[in-house]
Image: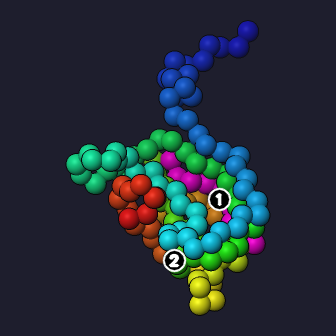
């Protein structure tokens, strides 16, 4: 008979959820005002004082793929990924993206904080760290 599971292990399995195995394909946009794809793990509620905490979430986002993103945007940011330092985002894939500004310039910024193993893109800067409704400041 196998040994019983450690209570701490069981509590951790039940307490710290994960969002994973998401695939978005063939997305089309028009006139976006911010990053086409944003992750923010800042905890801050509307009307609450302070900046929120952006580094201690134990909720993990992993194995996310965006395959095919086209259209127009007012922002040069294709992605803004502000993930937790405690549970970094892992295996984020963005491929076949042709998002452009109205003047034809490609949206080519990939802002990353605590992102491990990105595929299909290189991080070009750091995201804004702070709570917001859009995942960006």
- 123 or 136, which lies in front? 136
Q: Name the residue beneath numbered marker 1.
A: 92
Is 127 situated above or below 59?
A: below
Left or right relative to 53: residue 102: right
Number of numbered markers: 2
Residue 114 appears in view:
no
Circles 2 and 1 in contact, beta carbons < 8 Å: no
Q: Quadrant of residue 122?
A: bottom right
Is 53 situated above or below 92?
A: above
Range of magenta residues: 87-96
The nearer-to-camera label among 2 and 1 is: 2
Toward the left, the furthest residue is 49
Q: Residue 113 at x, y = what percent? A: 48, 63
Q: Name the residue beneath numbered marker 2.
A: 75
Q: Residues within 10 Å of mark 2 (few under 14, many from 20)?
A: many
Is 59 situated above or below 96?
A: above
| Residue at 73 percent of width and 9 percent of height | 1
């Amino acid at each position: 008979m196998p040994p019983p599971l450690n209570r701490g292990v069981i509590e951790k399995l039940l307490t710290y959820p994960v969002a994973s195995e998401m695939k978005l394909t063939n997305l089309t946009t028009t006139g976006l005002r911010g990053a086409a794809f944003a992750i923010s793990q800042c905890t801050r509620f509307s009307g609450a004082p302070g900046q929120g905490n952006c580094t201690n979430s134990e909720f993990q986002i992993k194995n996310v793929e965006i395959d095919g993103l086209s259209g127009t945007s007012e922002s040069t940011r294709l992605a803004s990924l502000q993930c937790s330092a405690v549970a970094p985002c892992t295996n984020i894939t963005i491929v076949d993206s042709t998002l452009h500004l109205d003047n034809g310039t490609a949206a080519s910024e990939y802002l990353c904080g605590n992102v491990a193993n990105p595929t299909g893109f290189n991080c070009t800067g750091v995201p804004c760290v702070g709570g917001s409704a859009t995942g960006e400041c």
